[in-house]
Image (cartoon, rainbow, N blue to C red):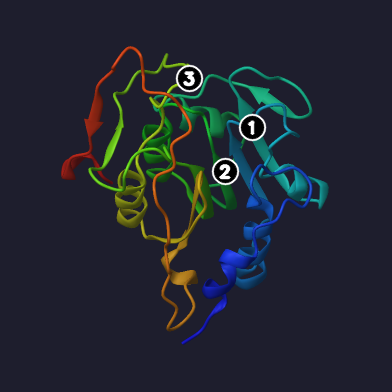
Amino acid sequence: MTTWLDTLATKAKIIAHSQTGEEGILEAIFAAVGTTNRYLVDIGAGNGVELSNTRLYLDQGWQGARFDRCYAVDGVHQEHITAETVCAVLAKYEVPREFDLLSLDIDGIDWYVLRAVLREYRPRVIVHEINHQRPYDPPVAVTYNPALVFRNSDYYGASLGAFHRLTKAHGYELIHMQPFNAFHIWRELMPEGGTPRIVWAPLQSWPPDPEQRPWYTIQPGDVP
C-alpha cells in the first residue's frame, strides 16, 4: 500500500533556512499528521536563522522555545544543555509535556539529551542529527561528558542504530533519513498499512578524532 511515507524522499527542499531540505520533509509530515498546539523545541538552534529547522514555523505563527550553548539572539535562549539540565531548562521556559516538534542538534551528547527529554516529554515529531559517519550498528554514542565540545572531527553524537533503539523504546517510528538527520513520529500517527523505507549509508566528511576518544556501546539497560 502506498502512503505519504513513500513520498518523503521527494519532499526535501530548503524553503527558507534549513541545511539540506529538512523544512520540506517536516512540511510533508505535518501535512499528513496534522498539528496540535503548534509548539516546538529547538535544542542547538545556533543563531536562530542560519541552517534552522524551526525558524520557518515561528514565522508561520508557531510558539516555542529555542536554546543554544553559544547564542543569545533572535529569541534563542543561551543555555548549557546536558542530560542533567535539559528537563529543568524546559520546565523553566514552561514547555508543555506534549508538543508538536523537537529539533535536536548539539554536535555532542545528543543521544543522552534525547533520552532525558523522552523520559519526561513527548514530542509528536522528532528531527535530530546523527553521526552520519558511523554505521547503523554497533549502537554507539560518544562517552558521556557534559563539557564535550565539537572539534571538527568524527567524534560527536551517536549512530543511527543507537538513536533508533532509543526512540523505538519510547513509542516512535523512524520514518525518514537524510544524510545528516533522522525523522521520527509517534507510532500511533503511522498511516494504516504504511511501512517506512529507510535508505541510508554512512557518509564520510569529518576527519578521524585525533584524540581517539572512546565510544560507548549502548546496552539494553540504557533504554528507555
Separation (CA) of disc 1 from disc 2: 8 Å
* Crowd class of label 1 (few under 14; some 14 to 19; many from 20; radius 10 Å): many
Separation (CA) of disc 2 from disc 3: 18 Å
Instruction: Please give the label number shown on residue 99.
Output: none
Q: Amino acid at mark 3?
A: Phe
Looking at the image, do the residues carrying marks 1 and 2 touch, with CB atoms under 8 Å apart? yes
Which residue is rendered at x = 35% and y = 14% of the image? 210
Which residue is rendered at x = 73% and y = 51% of the image? 14
Lower sequence index among marks 1 and 3 = 1
Which residue lies under the disc numbered 3?
150
Residue 11: where, in percent of width, then height? Answer: 65, 64
Instruction: Please give the label number shown on residue 45.
Output: 1
Q: Amino acid at mark 2?
A: Ser
Lower sequence index among marks 2 and 3 = 2
Helix, strand or loop at label 3? It is loop
Residue 52: where, in percent of width, then height? Answer: 69, 39
Which residue lies under the disc numbered 2?
103
Lower sequence index among marks 1 and 2 = 1
